[in-house]
Amino acid sequence: MANPEPTIRNAPLVDQFQRAITYLRLSVTDRCDLRCQYCMPERMQFLPRKDVLSLEELHRVALGFIDRGVRKIRLTGGEPLVRRDMMELTRALGRRLGDGLDELTLTTNATRLAEFADGLADAGVRRVNVSLDTLDPRKFAELSRRNRLDDVLAGIAAAKRAGLRVKLNTVALKGINEAEIPDIIAWAHGEEHDITLIEVMPLGEVDGERIDHYLPLTVIQDELNRRWTLRQSDHRSGGPARYWDIAETGGRLGLITPLTQNFCAGCNRVRVTATGQLYACLGGQEQVDLRAAVRSDDPDRALDAALNRAMAIKPERHHFAIRKSGEAPALARHMSMTGG
């Protein structure tokens, strides 16, 4: 297929299945200060810093998307708050809120959120997603290979004090946090936080076997329906979650089910890695090199052309599958590389 050149500058991003792309997940680093077992191996090899986009390049990429109709940007990692100049980028993008950008958000493990919560709020961030898979200190240390639960809880509390809405993301793991999930939901709702459960995704080599801990959310939902009254909600966040309201807790529960129930028909997003690789689908290999575009002699034109190519190759759906023991993962790249 020939690479299409742009015919209309600043035309909205629409893929070949007529889905408007209005949501960018932009990774600022692949590095993380945790080593969650389902995400990466203990001795994870991170990218050389020279391979990562500079602050100015990340900003240029983001502005290119805004000019093409992206209205929401989520900054991700790895752990975005471990990047030293992260807040400078956040403030720069925050200045585009109300000027092409409707929302600027962040996904974090919250280990450093207490330090940055006020600054994020001042920059225009109004909500954050926090990854939290257990409230048990021993289990947290085992699962993340770091004893940081107190820091995470302090970060969540600081975000709440700063006026940030917090949504918790919990990966459902058979034999690890399965029995604890109702308690995590009840705690989250008691703290006035929404929570979303996520099926484990087959991205990258890890030290164990993901299939041993794969827990279909249909199993969890059946258990929750026996315990509480769940009513389907019409709430939409711009992401892949489907939502339920729980009468007894007064809170909202989201479910992200890449394996048991495909959610691609309404996909409105793409991901860009910290090295500038645009992945048109989290579960696919289709990619376009934006780093080459922004480092070219005519970066604006090259970036426009690269975004058009991405729309031409974005697949209709992903094909995630949990492989059997001893088989390679569905995709070799880790989630910390792709961006959460």
Image (cartoon, helix red, strand yellow):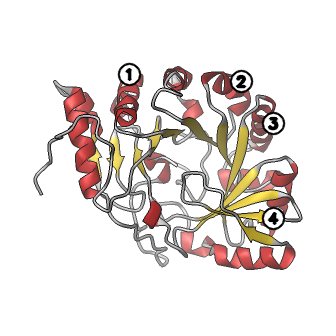
The mark closer to the camera, 2 or 4, is 4
Q: Residues within 10 Å of mark 4 (few under 14, many from 20)?
A: many
Give the mark nearer the N terminus: 2 vs 3.
2
Task: Tell me if 131 is positioned left or right of 319 in this view.
Answer: right
Give the residue type that dot 1 points to: Glu
Whether 284 is drawn above or below 192: the answer is below
Determine contact: label 4, label 1, CB under 8 Å: no
Residue under label 3, please give it: 157
Residue 246, which numbered label?
4
Q: Earlier in the sequence, mark 3 or mark 1?
A: 1
Q: Residue at label 1?
A: 56
Spot occupied by residue 163 in the image (x, y as percentages of width and height): 76, 31
Q: Residue at x 69, y 39 (%)?
A: 110
Where 317 sits versus 106, above or below? below
In this view, 336 is above or below 99 = below
Amino acid type indicated by mark 2: Asp
Q: Secondary structure at mark 4?
A: strand
For the residue pair 206 and 275, the one nearer the viewer reads as: 275
